[in-house]
Amino acid sequence: MSLSRRPIEVFGTTFQNPVLLAAGTAGFGRELARVVDLDRLGGVTTKAVSPEPRSGHAAPRVAEFSGGMLNAVGLANPGLERVAETEIPWLAANLRRARVIVNVVGAVAEDYVAVLRRLDGESFITGFELNVSCPNTARGGEEFGADEGVLAALVSACRGVTRRPLIVKLSPSLPDPARTAAAAASAGADGFTLVNTLPGSLYRARGSNGAGSRLGYGQGGVSGPALLPIGVLATRRVRERTGLPVIGVGGIRRIEDAKQYFQAGASLVAIGTAALADPRIPERIVAAWEADG
């Protein structure tokens, strides 16, 4: 598959290339600024932002295994006011070409609305990614994405306070992601991120400090190479059902993986776990995209 090197017109703006950093893996940008040329990328999706600060789950929060990684960070973030006063201004001052999408999470719909209302005046923000599918928290997230009526009500409430693009991040464990996406689209969603992590758990080996869970929270989200075919299928089904733009996420380590998502209909792709292992992978994929076609 040959890729066009032209900028991508999507979500009401222009992305210089289709490669983003996925939410939760790049902090708010500054954490990687000395390692990665962020302005070389198409964009950055921030960590989840909630109205209140969240300390996240107890350590250990990450466990590697042969097929990828299990994480239970618990949506740790400094809270809306700190993000508005410190993180967004840093991004605005340091990014000239890369677009910024803010990931939003909450325990109730009003939490999402509060974040959008507070940040909607920041012209630097391209859009909001509604995290309705986090598998490693007992508050919010997964309930919204699992119930189509609840999800539609959430999207509608968010649509009422912003005209910026609303991108709904869906779980790969939904019975029918395309049907769920259609419900969100009917309520005002502008596109989707597919997919979030899958729920999973791992135990420590017996005789190694006991035989309890390898994560402090007991369970977490599975990411890494095994998510690639799952994300590609979900992308194809949602794109065919809704016709709306999709950001493909899950298992991307090289340009060939990104092409799988593009063939399925994705407009953009986002790199997550692979960038944790090697922060320069997104830049290499950009270079391969530029050299292709």
Image (cartoon, rainbow, N blue to C red):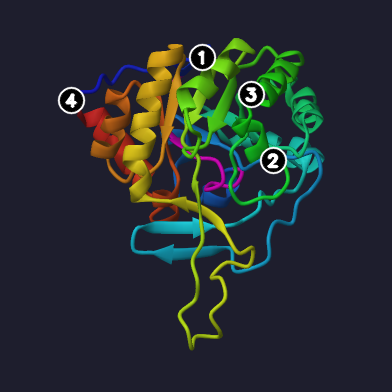
Marks 4,1: beta carbons within 8 A: no
Marks 2,4: beta carbons within 8 A: no
**Which residue is disc 3 drawn over?**
124
**Which residue is disc 1 drawn over?**
13
Q: Residue furthest front?
A: 175
CA distance for labels 3 and 2? 12 Å
Position of residue 288 relative to residue 6, above or below, is below
Q: Residue furthest bottom?
A: 207
Amino acid type of the residue tagged 2 in the rendering? Glu
Asked whether residue 17 appears in the rendered view, the answer is no
Amino acid type of the residue tagged 4 in the rendering? Met
- The span picked out in magenta is 15-28
**What is the secondary structure assignment of the residue under circle 1?**
strand
Q: Earlier in the sequence, mark 3 or mark 1?
A: 1
What crowding class fits label 4: few (fewer than 14 Cα within 10 Å), some (14-19), or many (20 or more)?
Answer: few
Q: Residue at x 69, y 25 (%)?
A: 150
Q: Earlier in the sequence, mark 1 or mark 2?
A: 1
Can you give x and y, in whole percent of width and height, for residue 285 in the image? 31, 39
**Which residue is disc 4 drawn over?**
1
What crowding class fits label 2: few (fewer than 14 Cα within 10 Å), some (14-19), or many (20 or more)?
Answer: some
* Rendering quarter of residue 189: top right
* Rendering quarter of residue 256: top left
Q: Residue at x 73, y 46 (%)?
A: 139
